Image: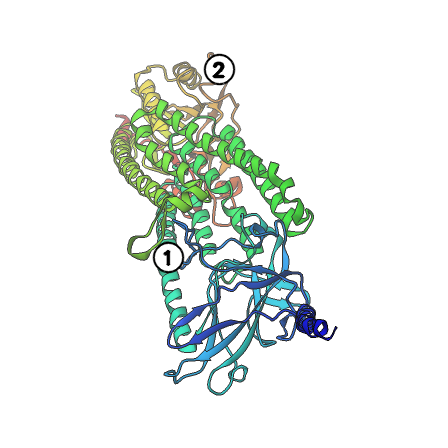
Amino acid sequence: MKKTHIFLLPLLLLGSNFLRAQSAPAPVPVTQITIGQSTVQLTGPWKFHIGDNMTWAQPGFDDSGWGTMDLTPPRSAGPELDAIGGEVLPGWTARGYPGYSGYAWYRLRVNVQEAAQATNTALALKMPGLFDDAYQVYVNGQLVGEFGRFTKHGVTYYGSQPRAFSLPAHVLSANGSGPLTIAIRMWMHPSTLQPRGAGGMHGPPVLGKASVIGASLDLDGYTLDRRRASDFLEAAILLLAMLAAFGLYWLDRSEPAYLWLGLACVDSATFNLFVLAQFWIRPASFLYLTLLLTLGVVIGFWVIFWGYWFRLGNMARLHRMVWGLVLLFLVVAVMRRALFANHIIPAQAAAWLSPLSVILNILNMLLVVLLLWVAYRGIRKDRTEGWLALPAVVLLAISRFQGTELIRKWINLHPYGISVHLDQVAYVLALAIVTVLLLRRFLQGQQERARIRTELQQARSVQEMLIPQHSVQVPGFAVESVYIPASEVGGDFFQVQPGDDGSVLIVVGDVSGKGLKAAMTVSAIVGALRDRKERQPAEVLAHLNRVLHGQVSGFVTCCATLITSDGAMTLANAGHLSPYRNGEEMAVAGGLPLGILAEGSYEETQYQLASGDRLTFMSDGVVEATNEKRELFGFERTQQISNQAAAAIAETAKAFGQQDDITVVTIERRAIPAYALV
């Protein structure tokens, strides 16, 4: 019996030790690291838990029941890289917490051992350059830094970028050794759920000497600046293109394509500036603004630009089609954004928004198809112009998919460390082609304007031969005339034709419209007057009406007056201003302007001029002169100066504010000396 007890004693002791081991808590995992002149990646595995509790920052908190999150970079071929070239790890939504947004905590315990040769024990912690969306870092329960702003009203967050935080000296022993508990409080906005694999840190933090961490952070900043250089370059190119487009439009308002090109460049340049300023603008505002500036609006500007460039007809219809699609695109995009940002749709129900994403893709494709359709119509209208523009249109269609993951991930160049994407290359090349086309059209326009100036000068020379430049000498009458066209050539005309019987026929008129077309009508009128032998005013007007009917798109006002040597005066008026006699407006029977009806009749009015009577004929360029206050010269001022010399009347109206051609003809009846009758 005693032997049996002795034999069972070891078994009882072993069992009691086993039970004691089972009841004791599991040891807390501690990572052993040695800090020398290099840095150490804190890959973990980290303890991870969703939710928020400030006690989780304390080193004594028991996190043994939490899950784990390994931050070891993948070793697979071709990993995704962040802005500074680091490998991107999937976030918590791809590692067991799909559809979750809000707070989550990472915790890691490390035991720091200082290398023997180290002299400076100051340490720093560098956080990964890519994360979602804001964080606070606690070391041994003490807050050492944050990215974003955490308040009781919520969290303000910015575009992610590398940050480093110095560790307080008292968290380690004097020789730089000791345990550290690092707790990272993360927060993610619901809208960040849209990319796959979002949530938390996308790379491991790095612990090391403060000097080494500082140098590493400077290197990251340098690398980031080099990778952003393409954005700065693109923004500079867009600003130059914008200035060129608006400058051309200022020089040539007849080409609206320049204006729409400038608007497209403004939109794209603004987007680039927002991208470059994303670290100082809240992403909620940033995404909203870029949404309004780029999602559909840019492509809309380009479609309208090409429509005007190819001079397609029915631009009002094209405007309705483009801006209808753009408006629908923006409404759907803003709705999709608002449902996430305002928590209207719970994060777990994000899949419900898939139809909206499909609609956005369809609208995007429709805008691109509309762009290509405009190019097709341009080719059909003008093959040379269309085929020259087609490469730019295709490149713009490619750049439209600037957010496509395939383009961003696989078609990405890094010349001299500068990150360049295909959409940027396509857009800049498209602008280069458009610039060449602009230069080509501008030179063609200059040649066309030079040709028109030559034709106008020739027309002016012809008009000077048709319209008297000097007062006509008529026995018994003093005639003065002034003609001031508003441009190179004008639409006013007058003729003073002495007769063999001592009479004088005065015809004063105004062609509706201005420019070369009006000048050609004037030439036809003067030619018809000189070929006509009849001098009765009513018949003169009827003849001119027959000549002009069906030959002019507008109308012609005209007043014909025949004055005999004894002062008998006969007038007929076709919608023109009545003449003035001695400063008073004369009552004259009115009639329709010339060229409106095929057969027109005009009533004559008789007057008798005494010796010394003065007649003044004017075009409406005097009455309609307008000053800088937009006041008309008017009939009252016209009557007040109607008895002055022709040159004085014309200069007064011109100084007031000439808007139209100005013609003034004055004639004064004088007694004929007796010797002249012999």
Can I make out residue 197 in this image?
A: yes
In the rendered image, the vertical position of residue 607 relative to residue 401, given as above or below: above
In the rendered image, the vertical position of residue 511 relative to residue 200, given as above or below: above
Front residue of 90/281: it is: 90
Closer to the observer: label 1 or label 2?
A: 1
Where does the image place residue 625, in percent across and percent down from the top left?
Answer: 46, 42
- Provide the secondary structure element on which disc 2 rests: loop
Colour logic:
rainbow
* Label 1 packing within 10 angstroms: few (<14), some (14-19), many (20+): many
Which residue is labeled 2 in the image?
A: 597
Where does the image place residue 100, in percent across and percent down from the top left?
Answer: 63, 53
Identify the amino acid type marked 2: Leu
Q: Earlier in the sequence, mark 1 or mark 2?
A: 1
Residue 678 placement: quadrant:
top left
Which residue is labeled 1 in the image?
A: 227
C-alpha distance separating marks 1 and 2:
74 Å
Front residue of 261/19: it is: 19
Residue 327 placement: quadrant:
top right
Identify the amino acid type marked 1: Arg
Residue at 54% across, 34% down: 325
